[in-house]
Image (cartoon, rainbow, N blue to C red):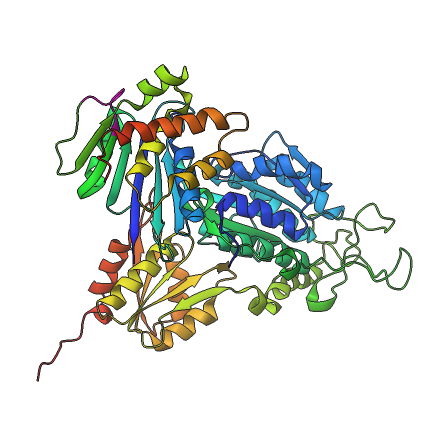
Amino acid sequence: MKRIEVILSGSGGQGLILAGIVLAEAALLAGWRAVQTQSYGPEARGGASRSEVIISDEEIEYPRVERADVLLAMNQESCDKYVSAVKAGGLVIVDSTYVSRLPSASVKIVSLPVTKAVRERLGKPVAANMAALGALVTFLPEIPPDLAVQALTERVPPGTEEINRQAFRLGGELAGTLIPNP
Amino acid sequence: MTDRLKLMQGNEAVAEAALAAGARFFAGYPITPSTEIAEIMAARLPAAGGRFIQMEDEIAGISAVIGASLAGQKAFTATSGPGFSLMQENLGFAAMVEAPCVVVNVQRLGPGTGIPTAPGQGDVMQARWGTHGDHPAVAFCPGSVREAYDLTIQAFNAAERLRTPVILLLDEIVAHMREGVHLPPPDELVIIDRPRPAGPPGSIGAAPAYRPGKGEVPAIPDFGTGYRFHVTGLVHDETGLPVNDSRVADGLIRRLHRKIELARREITFTRACRLEDAQVAVIAYGSAARSARQAVREARERGVQAGFLQLQTIWPFPAEEVANLSRRVPQLIVAEMNLGQLEAEVRRAVSGKAEVIPLTSGGGRLFTPEEILGAICTAPGGRLKKVVHQ
């Protein structure tokens, strides 16, 4: 049985629950089973927000993360708080726009200026969640990027498809600079 | 090639199933973690020829639902702890006047305002005894998105055929979780409508509105369609008019219970696995059943003879099923996200024939499979047999 556990975390309003939904949808499109759950505070903006996605080739019973394979942290608080949920040797992707203190745990760390790049290249920071997702799927060979783009197109608010697709590709480019092509 | 799995949320499955079951009226007051149900019904009902009303509070919500039901619509509301408390008085009224309706309670951590976005299973006994008087209760408890869909259909069917309020008890995990599901095609669904009079007003077919029919359920007409009858929360006779006769009262209360009891088999849903040779079994419901099932699978992988019984119906309590289990399995772990609400019911059904081991939680988070596995492995029946090397 293959089971991949992903945590997408940050501050409420950064769009991490939507990013989790798109990731789960993309996994289904690719023929995997997927479950997405969330935990958040009562605030509409601010507070801690966390979306979890489990991807598996078998029926998923326990729907929450036990030991995360990948953590996406879009702010310092979530990076500090959730890094302990990542398994040894797991991957932590941080948005360096908001995360300056990197964890010292025995994990692989990828630091990318996600929100900064979206703001500079696309003019506004609202699609930073999709840019982060674009970076994240670069490290998940189970999720073909074109299926993530298809899932994104179905799930983002109507009228914002293009800017979100651009942000997704931008995120992929940011991550691609770190991955040597075979 | 199978159809693509659809990514769907538990609350969304409830809303879709309600529409598929024929619900065309929703009145309520949005509250976390049930809000998506109201949102979806607001968007979908007008287009389906139905009506959505956001009321001033939950008391008004259930009142409007009962009114719509008496007028002939399949009607429901959705709420969470604080709102469910407000609905209790009218829940009893609906039972007394035999108004079919479905009340969805997405359980969050309580009491009081608790943690609105955290899961709990603290409303199990409230679903049974929250409203006053000696009334029956029907409550279903889904553990997955697909179960949320199926049990919503069953909730409307049970409400209609038995003319009684039915409670659908979700918890925050199941309500907010999204997973890939295949939904049954509409033509495969069995949809039940309430019994109605066999003839027009004034004819022989139009018996007094509250005269018991098949299965002790009266064929009450839709209000406002020409039949003359009275609806009251007071003890009433077959015409619906109030009476003070204790014999009538006794007959009515016993019949309200009996109509549920007669249908017990058709409204009792459980899911069992690996019980054939089990020495220890976990009983669980709602999202806790998911952790339990994984724990039992992991226990089996270690060679422990563990099994699992999920209660999808919690009221009426599946006493027969639990009693049967206790004759075969010596240790029963009851895992629930409260301090032991169904455990006492399990003990009552088991009546000393098996050891009952509670695994409780104040709520706020789901049991991990590891916690339940720990309980399995420390139960006497869960210990590994000594391997004898020859």
Q: Nearer the viewer, residue B210 or A44?
A: A44
Magenta stretch encompasses residue B84: no
**Main SS category, magenta section:** loop
Rendered position, B17 above or below B64: below
Query: Horizontal and vertical percent for residue B327?
Result: 37, 77
The residue at the point 8 percent across, 85 percent down is B390
Q: Is residue B338 left or right of residue B238?
A: left
Query: Horizontal and vertical percent for residue A64?
Result: 33, 46
Query: Which region shows up in magenta?
Result: A94-100
The residue at the point 36 percent across, 58 percent down is A58
The residue at the point 38 percent across, 57 percent down is A59
Q: Which quadrant, please, contains the C terminus of chain A?
A: top left
Q: Nearer the viewer, residue B48 or B203?
A: B48
Query: Horizontal and vertical percent for residue B72?
Result: 75, 49
Q: Nearer the viewer, residue B238 or B9?
A: B9
Based on the displayed image, in which of its 4 quarters is residue B114 positioned?
A: top left
Rendered position, A178 above or below A62: above
Q: Do we see residue B271 in this rendering?
A: yes
